[in-house]
Amino acid sequence: MEGAIIVGIVFGGIVLCLAIIGVTILMGIKIAKGGFSRKSRQSHTEDAKMIQEMYQGLTRMEERVEALETILMEKTRKDPRS
């Protein structure tokens, strides 16, 4: 009777390990193909758009700063007292 319990535990453990390995492999394939759900893809798309908007805003800000620097440099050239 004890032998049957031990055999059941061993086989149950093997089946459980194989199931865990299979699920892990399937999850890896699913992640590699593009995520789990539409929500995660939509979230990724929204994040990408937000980053692009931030980059464009920073580019415009950089242009403004350069323009201000130019104005300040011209002003200091005209006004030798400063």
Image (cartoon, rainbow, N blue to C red):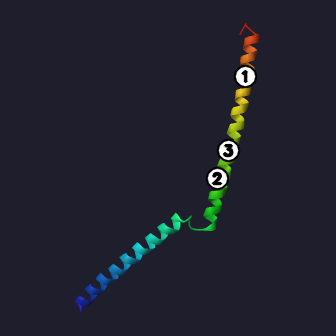
Give coordinates of residue 66: x percent, y percent. Answer: 70, 27
Looking at numbered disc 1 in the image, what kind of residue is underneath it?
A: Thr
The local secondary structure at tag 1 comes to helix
Relative depth, front residue between 76 and 11: 76
The local secondary structure at tag 3 comes to helix
Residue, x 68% and y 52% (percent of image)?
A: 49
Residue, x 64% and y 59% (percent of image)?
A: 43
Which residue carries the number 1 mark? 70
- As drawn, 72 above or below 36: above
Do the numbered discs 2 and 1 sit on residues whose CB atoms are within 8 Å? no
Label 3 vs 1, first from the N-terminus: 3
Which residue carries the number 2 mark? 48
Instruction: For the N terminus, give its image quadrant.
Output: bottom left
Would you call the spot at circle 1 few (<14 residues within 10 Å), some (14-19), or many (20 or more)? few
| Alpha-carbon span between mark 3 and mark 1 | 24 Å
User: Quarter of the image holding residue 34?
Assistant: bottom right
Query: Does residue 18 appear to the left or right of 41 in the view shown?
Result: left
Which residue carries the number 3 mark? 54
Query: Does residue 17 appear to the left or right of 35 in the view shown?
Result: left
Would you call the spot at circle 3 few (<14 residues within 10 Å), some (14-19), or many (20 or more)? few
Residue 12: numbered disc = none
Label 2 vs 1, first from the N-terminus: 2
| Alpha-carbon span between mark 2 and mark 1 | 33 Å
- As drawn, 72 above or below 33: above
Looking at numbered disc 3 in the image, what kind of residue is underneath it?
A: Met
Instruction: For the C terminus, give its image quadrant.
Output: top right
Relative depth, front residue between 3 and 38: 38
Give coordinates of residue 67: x percent, y percent. Answer: 74, 27
Residue, x 75% and y 10% (percent of image)?
A: 79
- As drawn, 47 above or below 35: above
